[in-house]
């Protein structure tokens, strides 16, 4: 939907580069190239798709698929989504987040608050993942990020550190820095902890060590 159509449909005055909030929306979609979107408390949207802008959602609101190219996704408490993804930006939320499928970033962290329930995967490429007292139905993966599982977090699938290419340093190509994985005593991974690169491990529960599987190709 074009901006002019959106404004006409809901009687909005839209200023370039400003946040937009549509009152009392009911599964309305937002599809924009420039500008951000704000969803108020008790509002319920369909898909929200932005190219250059961020998404902010107030407590007790919902949307279907939220996707951003250049911008962050900031969520308050008790948000319900089908999925959320961003290329260059972070995903952060308050407590009680419910996501039916996946949370994904390329260059950005994923920090849901406590009591998050994610029905799919949690994935980053260059971004940290921090989960506290939450449940992940499938896998967690990253390439260059740190992962921390705390509280009574449960990952029902695998936790995967994917292989990464070499980073170019002043003296040549190297990838000497290791990402970090910290699993506190009460957190658990029910699947494998699959390491396809060297990772600095801090496993407070010794039982988690039995989950670790190394699959490192040093020739890559």
Image: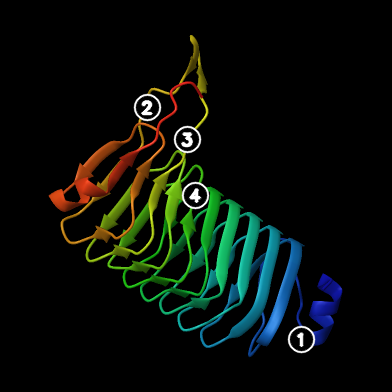
User: Cα distance, mark 2 to mark 1?
Assistant: 51 Å
**Secondary element at tag 1:** helix
Residue that carries the numbered disc 4 in the rendered image: 124
Q: Nearer the viewer, mark 2 or mark 1?
A: 2
Q: Of circles 3 and 2, which is in front?
A: 3
Task: Report how far apart the C-alphas of labels 1 and 3 lie in the structure.
Answer: 48 Å
- Measured in 3D between alpha carbons, the distance from the residue under mark 2 to the one under mark 4, in whole angstroms, is 18 Å
Residue 41 spot, x, y in % from top left: 51, 84
**Residue 26 percent coordinates (x, y):** 66, 89
User: Is 135 positioned to the left or the right of 42 in the image?
Assistant: left
Q: Quadrant of the N terminus?
A: bottom right
Q: Is residue 75 visible?
A: yes
Which mark sits nearer the N-terminus, 1 or 4?
1
| Dot 1 crowding, Cα within 10 Å, few <14, some 14–19, many 20+ | few
- Asked if residue 205 can be seen in this view, the reply is no
Within 10 angstroms of label 3, few (less than 14), some, or many (20 or more) residues? some
Q: Are marks 3 and 2 in contact (CB under 8 Å)?
A: no
Name the mark nearer the viewer: 1 or 3: 3
Task: Evaluate if marks 2 and 1 touch, with contact meaning CB atoms under 8 Å apart.
Answer: no
Q: Which residue is mark 2?
A: 177
């Amino acid at each position: 939907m074009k901006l002019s159509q959106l404004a006409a449909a809901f009687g909005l005055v839209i200023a370039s580069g400003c946040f937009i909030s549509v009152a009392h929306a009911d599964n309305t979609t937002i599809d924009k190239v420039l500008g951000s979107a704000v969803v108020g408390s008790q509002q319920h949207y369909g898909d929200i798709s932005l190219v250059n802008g961020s998404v902010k959602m107030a407590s007790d609101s919902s949307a279907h698929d939220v996707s951003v190219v250049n911008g962050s996704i900031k969520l308050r408490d008790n948000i319900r989504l089908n999925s959320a993804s961003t290329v260059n930006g972070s995903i952060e939320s308050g407590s009680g987040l419910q996501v039916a499928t996946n949370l994904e970033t390329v260059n950005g962290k994923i920090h849901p608050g406590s009591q998050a329930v994610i029905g799919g995967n949690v994935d980053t490429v260059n971004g940290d993942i921090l989960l506290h007292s939450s449940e992940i139905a499938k896998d967690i993966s990253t390439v260059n990020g740190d992962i921390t599982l705390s509280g009574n977090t449960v990952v029902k699938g695998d936790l995967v550190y994917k292989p990464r290419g070499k980073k170019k340093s002043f003296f040549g190509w190297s990838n000497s820095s290791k990402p970090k994985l910290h699993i506190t005593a009460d957190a658990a991974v029910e699947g494998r902890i699959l390491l396809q690169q060297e990772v600095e491990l801090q496993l407070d529960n010794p039982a988690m060590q039995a989950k670790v599987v190394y699959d490192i190709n040093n020739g890559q």
